[in-house]
């Protein structure tokens, strides 16, 4: 079994897979990778099943030292990465040997980069998943200096690398202004007609307080047509909640499963990986759309 020592953890590096669906009734969100297509692509490039546990970095990546050989792939937000003095590519599998040190640099655009190891990370599962959940605290803690990760053991022999994933490719060039599609409702009737129109026309900016739970947005206040608050009701990834100050929150992978702020709209699920790659200070414009991909 190959072991990986964390020489430096990066800004925020967590272990993620495709999450733990099916537990919302006890208050546990799905969690898992923010940019799911990028995680799937990384795993397929090194011959893993789609949901194998991998690393999700945030803006600045880690330094990792290996005591054995393995195959690695980097996807998602583009970074400069090196093994020793050798530059290694994005979106391709490459080999590291015993004693090698991988340095994952800062993302040049986007926010989250994925580091997959051949056969995946050996980690105990919680409710069927290895995902680190920022809301509930389930799953392993974020990486820290001195941690040692175990790469799953498997039979020797030749490498089997899957063909590229059919899902959309990871973000390679994220523009400063992004358009996210949404469906109006279910609580749009709690807002003035002007606010509903404003959501689909005026730009919003990602606030510094954003995280894996949700993007806090700054822009023109979305004013309500009703007073009071709703009883708590179910929430889904992509829901756009609006607190009393009128500044919306776009819920991401680690979102709460219930809430009382009215949801003015829900972002199309196909656009959530892009939303998960947005940095503080970037601009969002929302566009009303149908259910088509």
Image (cartoon, rainbow, N blue to C red):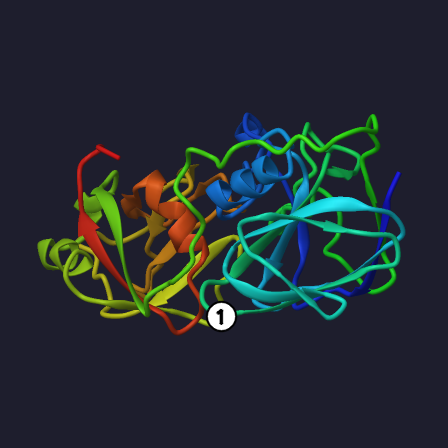
Give the residue furthest to the front: 158
Residue at the spot 32% in from the left edge and 70% down from the top edge: 176
Q: Is residue 228 left or right of residue 63?
A: left
Vertically, is 160 above or below 191? above
Pinpoint residue 179: horizontal percent, then vertical percent. Answer: 25, 57
Q: Residue at x 32, y 64 (%)?
A: 247
Q: Position of residue 225 (x, y in %)?
A: 17, 54
At mark 1, the secondary structure is: loop
Q: Return the residue at label 1.
A: 108
Q: Is residue 220 above or below residue 43?
A: below
Image point 71% across, 33% down: which residue?
Answer: 159
Query: Which residue is at the front of the view, 217 or 129?
Result: 129
Q: Residues within 10 Å of mark 1 (few under 14, many from 20)?
A: some
Q: Quadrant of the C terminus?
A: top left
Depth order, front residue of 14/22: 14
The N terminus: image quadrant: top right
* x and y, in percent, of residue 89 in the image: 58, 58
- Quarter-of-image position of residue 13: bottom right
Q: From this view, report whether residue 226 is shown above or below residue 42.
A: below
Left or right position of 69 against 185:
right
As rendered, which of 281 and 2 lies closer to the eye?
2
Q: Quadrant of residue 106?
A: bottom right
Q: Position of residue 44 (x, y in %)?
A: 57, 35
Q: Can you say whether 126 is above or below 111 in the image? A: above
118 left or right of 277? Answer: right
């Amino acid at each position: 079994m190959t072991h990986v020592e964390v020489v430096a953890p990066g800004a925020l590096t967590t272990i993620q897979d495709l999450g733990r669906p099916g537990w919302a009734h006890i208050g546990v969100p799905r969690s898992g990778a923010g940019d799911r297509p990028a995680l799937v692509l990384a795993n397929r490039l090194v011959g893993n099943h789609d949901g194998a546990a991998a690393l999700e970095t945030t803006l600045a990546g880690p330094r990792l030292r290996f005591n054995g050989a393995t195959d690695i792939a980097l996807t998602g937000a583009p970074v400069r990465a090196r093994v020793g003095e050798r530059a290694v590519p994005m979106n391709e599998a490459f080999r590291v040997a015993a004693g090698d040190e991988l340095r994952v640099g800062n993302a040049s655009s986007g926010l989250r980069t994925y580091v997959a190891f051949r056969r995946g990370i050996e980690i105990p599962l919680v409710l069927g998943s290895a995902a680190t959940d920022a809301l509930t605290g389930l799953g392993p803690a974020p990486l820290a200096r001195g941690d040692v990760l175990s790469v799953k053991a498997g039979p020797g022999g030749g490498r089997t690398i899957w063909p590229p994933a059919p899902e959309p490719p990871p973000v390679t060039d994220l523009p400063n202004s992004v358009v996210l599609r949404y469906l109006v409702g279910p609580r749009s009737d709690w807002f003035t007609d002007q606010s509903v129109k404003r959501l689909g026309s005026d730009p919003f900016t990602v606030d510094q307080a954003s995280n894996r739970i949700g993007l806090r947005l700054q822009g023109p206040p979305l004013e309500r047509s009703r007073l009071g608050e709703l009883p708590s009701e179910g929430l889904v990834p992509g829901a756009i909640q609006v607190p009393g100050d009128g500044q919306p929150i776009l819920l991401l992978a680690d979102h709460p499963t219930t809430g009382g702020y009215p949801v003015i709209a829900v972002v199309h699920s196909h656009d959530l990986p892009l939303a998960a790659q947005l940095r503080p200070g970037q601009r969002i414009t929302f566009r009303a759309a149908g259910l088509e991909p």
